[in-house]
Every structure is written in C-alpha cells, then in structure tokens.
C-alpha cells in the first residue's frame, strides 16, 4: 500500500477545527471519549474538538474521528488495549551487536547499493548518511544488514527514501536482526492488535501541540533510556506526512564529547545519571490507567562507549535524565542544562531530515539525540517505529578494562584519518589581548 502525503489545506477542507481545550483540562474527558468510542465502535460527538498536547510527552493518540473512514492505514492507528494488570519487568537480553560482524567500511552494503545504481552519501561531516537510489530495505541480506549496523554506528542516522513496499512485518524482521524488539511501557500500539513491539507515531487535526509547554532544546532525547538495556537502533517509517514541516533533527553525542575540554571530559566520564520513566508514565494516566509495565528508574554512565566503534559519546537527555548521582543539585542542574544546550546548539553536527511518505530513518540511540519539529498542525503525520534493545550502557572505565582497548575521541580519530595535528591547548598566552585585559 502506497504511503501518502497530506497538506494543511487538505485537512482544513476536510475537518472543521473546533473549540480548543485548555492544556491540562481534557484528561478525564479524553479518557471518557475514548472509552465511548471503544464501546460503540465509532467516533464521539466531540470529534471536532481539539486536544492540546505537550510534545514533551506525546507520541500519538486519536482524539475523535481520526483521519476518516477511507484512510488506507487504519489498521495502524494508535490503540490502547484494556489491561487488568501490568506485565512483569523486562528480562535481561544477551546481545552481541551485529555491527561487530560487519565488513570494514560497510563494504558489502556499499557494493549492494552501487550494484543497483545507488550511492551512499554523507550529509554532514559528523552525522547523517542517505542511501540514494532504488534500494529496498527488505532485499538486504544478513551481511548487508550487519554492514548497515556498522554504518549507523559510525554515522548516527541513515536515511532511505521511497520504502513504500516495506511491510510492517519486514520492518520488524529488520529490527529483530539487530536485537530483541522493545515493547514500550506506556505508548499506544497499532489497532491491528498483533504488534505489541511497534510504537505508533501519530498527530492530526485533533492533537494540537502546546507551543508554550516546552523549550525546543528540551525536546532532544534518546528513546526510552530509562530501560536497563536501552535501544540501539530505531527504525522509523513514515506512512503519511505533511507536505511541509514536522522535520526531525539528530544531534551527535560523539561530537558533544569531542567539543569539551579534557578536564570536562574526564569529569563527565566519572559521573552517572538517573534515567526515569515516571514522568512519561504519569503523562499517560489520562489515556490508560494500567500501563503495560510499571515505570522504573535506572542509573547509566554519563559517557558511554559504543561497542562497535569504540568511540565515546555523551549519553544524557532532558527527556528522561532527572539528575546526576552523587552531585549537589545546583551542580547537577548546571551540568545537565549545559549538555542539553550542547546537543541543541551544535549546528555543525545536527542533521535535519524533511520527510516524504515512505521514508525510513534508522538511527543509533546510543550516540545521537533527536527531536521532531511541531510546526505542521493540523496536518496528519503517521508513522511506525520499531526499536531493538542493545547492551547495557558501557562506561569508559568498563570498556577499557574489559576489552583492553582505549576508548576513542571522535575528533581525534578524524584528525588522525586526515593526517592533521590537533590544535595546541590554550595556555592563556597565545591569544590576542581582549578588551578586558
């Protein structure tokens, strides 16, 4: 089934925009409306009312009529099944990263692409690669998938256009190649009913983002980092997109680390942070009373090492990190705010993707934070996300003690590959005098 694009004008022509509900007020009413719709099998009288959502904790719900009776992807609309109790905590998964089986420089994947007239093209020096040409993800063999795992680990995010033939079954199979598929603790799954390991990304004319509820920098995050074994790759396919807007940005944790002074790097390597799922769970209580799993908090290193590349990456995000461990609150807040801004402001290491229907983005949550833009309301945006687990985050000390190898700095590795000497450290004497001197 071919993916489609909708424009703001089309949506406005189809559905009148009704009374705006104030932020914070509609939870009980929304829950009742969804219960009524579930019981009756059709939409409620409040279909034309708009729910204001906080993008900080919103991924996708249908409030009211949804996209209409003839929508071709109706089976993938968000659905929250009734539960009488939560599932037990996730088990431990024994995971070996498939990138460790890759050919150096992902040579087999590159040959596969070039044999079909395509090209592997980097977008920025530090992050982002697009696979150009008529390349179908479902045709990749195991060797090409292993090389793709390496490429994503090196580049942070890899994009494929025109994946209209990729079924959800094939998307899940690709995810399973990288690791056990994550089942989200709270978010909606497809209405079809047999896809508990798929997250629905959805927004329409009934879910209006509250632009006063968040700062843009706060939206950069890595997926569900509160899990004991947070995701490695995420595979997101957009079924329906706005004609313009709702882009996604990815910012590199490799380069955030490389941008810091040596003393700051060493300081951060010594720290751990608390990643919490409680806020996300609390935001869902108006939609579903009993979550799939009860929320948890987990401690992870602030700087982790990617097991395939051996490169250090800053691993914090404002979406789930609540504080640093063993650090006074004022100091913790200052450091976390600083790192939040580093991710949001590094324009030379942040790639932006303007989606078209059928596009697929595959990114590595261990080394990039990402954020959507919420600028295309009231257009319809609908996608399916598959997210395999990865290893428990590895600190620099643990990596070096268990592998016998020294963890690497992205910028130092780039200088080495180019034969460039790094800049000399600032000794306070080599700079031109400033007006305060």
Image (cartoon, grey):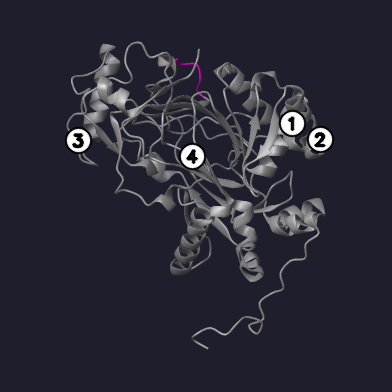
- Mark 3 or mark 2, which has the lower sequence index? 3
- Mark 1 or mark 4, which has the lower sequence index? 1
- Mark 1 or mark 3, which has the lower sequence index? 3
Alpha-carbon span between mark 4 and mark 2: 29 Å
Q: Is residue 234 rendered to the left or right of residue 100? A: left
Residue found 71% across the figure and 69% down from its top:
423
Which one is in front in this view, the residue at disc 4 or the one at disc 3?
Answer: 4
As displayed, is residue 106 above or below residue 430?
Answer: above
Q: Which residue is mark 1?
A: 146
Residue found 78% across the figure and 62% down from its top:
420
Q: Which residue is mark 3?
A: 20
- Residue 303 visible? The answer is no
Tell me the quarter of the picture where residue 171 sits: top right
Alpha-carbon span between mark 1 and mark 3: 48 Å
Classify 10 Å Cα crowding around label 3: few (below 14), some (14-19), many (20 and above).
some
Q: Which residue is mark 2?
A: 103
User: What element does badge 3 sit on?
Assistant: loop
- Mark 4 or mark 3, which has the lower sequence index? 3
- Residue 168 visible? The answer is yes
Which one is in front in this view, the residue at disc 4 or the one at disc 2?
Answer: 4
Give the x, y percent position of residue 10. 31, 23
Residues shaded magenta: 192-196
Q: Is residue 160 magenta?
A: no
Give the x, y percent position of residue 242. 40, 29
User: What element does badge 1 sit on?
Assistant: helix
Alpha-carbon span between mark 4 and mark 3: 26 Å
* Of 299 and 60, the residue lying toward us: 60
Name the mark on residue 248: 4
The answer to whether mark 2 and mark 1 are in CB contact below 8 A is: yes
């Amino acid at each position: 089934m071919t993916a489609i694009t909708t424009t703001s004008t089309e949506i406005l022509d189809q559905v009148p925009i009704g009374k705006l509900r104030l932020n914070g007020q509609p939870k009980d009413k929304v829950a009742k409306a969804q219960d009524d719709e579930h019981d009756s099998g059709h939409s409620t009288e409040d279909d034309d009312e708009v729910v204001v959502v906080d993008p900080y904790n919103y991924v996708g719900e249908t409030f009211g009529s949804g996209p209409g009776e003839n929508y071709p992807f109706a089976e993938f609309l968000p659905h929250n099944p009734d539960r009488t109790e939560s599932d037990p905590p996730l088990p431990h998964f024994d995971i070996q990263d498939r990138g460790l089986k890759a050919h150096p420089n992902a040579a087999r994947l590159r040959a596969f692409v070039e044999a079909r007239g395509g090209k592997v093209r980097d977008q920025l020096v530090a992050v982002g690669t697009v696979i150009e040409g008529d390349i179908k993800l479902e045709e990749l063999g195991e060797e090409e998938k292993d090389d793709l795992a390496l490429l994503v680990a090196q580049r942070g995010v890899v994009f494929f256009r025109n994946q209209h033939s990729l079924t959800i079954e094939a998307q899940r199979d690709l995810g399973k190649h990288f690791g056990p598929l994550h089942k989200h603790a709270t978010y909606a799954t497809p209405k079809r009913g047999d896809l508990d390991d798929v997250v629905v990304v959805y927004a329409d004319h009934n879910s209006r983002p509250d632009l006063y509820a968040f700062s843009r920098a706060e939206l950069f995050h890595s997926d569900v980092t509160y899990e004991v074994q947070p995701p490695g790759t995420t595979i997101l396919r957009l079924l329906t997109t706005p004609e313009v807007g709702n882009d996604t940005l990815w910012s590199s944790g490799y380069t955030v680390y490389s941008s810091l002074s040596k003393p700051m790097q060493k300081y951060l390597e010594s720290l751990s942070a608390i990643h919490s799922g409680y806020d996300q769970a609390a935001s869902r209580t108006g939609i579903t009373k009993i979550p799939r799993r009860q929320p948890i908090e987990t401690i992870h290193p602030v700087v982790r090492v990617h097991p395939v590349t051996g490169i250090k990456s800053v691993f914090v995000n404002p979406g789930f990190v609540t504080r640093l461990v063993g650090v006074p609150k004022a100091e913790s807040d200052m450091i976390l705010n600083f790192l939040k801004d580093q991710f949001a402001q590094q324009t030379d290491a942040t790639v932006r993707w303007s989606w078209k229907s059928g596009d697929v983005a595959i990114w590595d949550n261990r080394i990039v934070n990402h954020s959507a833009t919420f600028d295309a309301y009231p257009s319809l945006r609908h996608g399916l996300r598959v997210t395999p687990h990865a290893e428990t985050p590895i600190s620099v000390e643990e990596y070096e003690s268990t592998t016998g190898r020294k963890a690497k700095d992205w910028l130092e590795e780039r200088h080495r590959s180019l034969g460039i000497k790094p800049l000399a450290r600032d000794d306070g004497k080599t700079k031109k005098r400033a007006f305060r001197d």
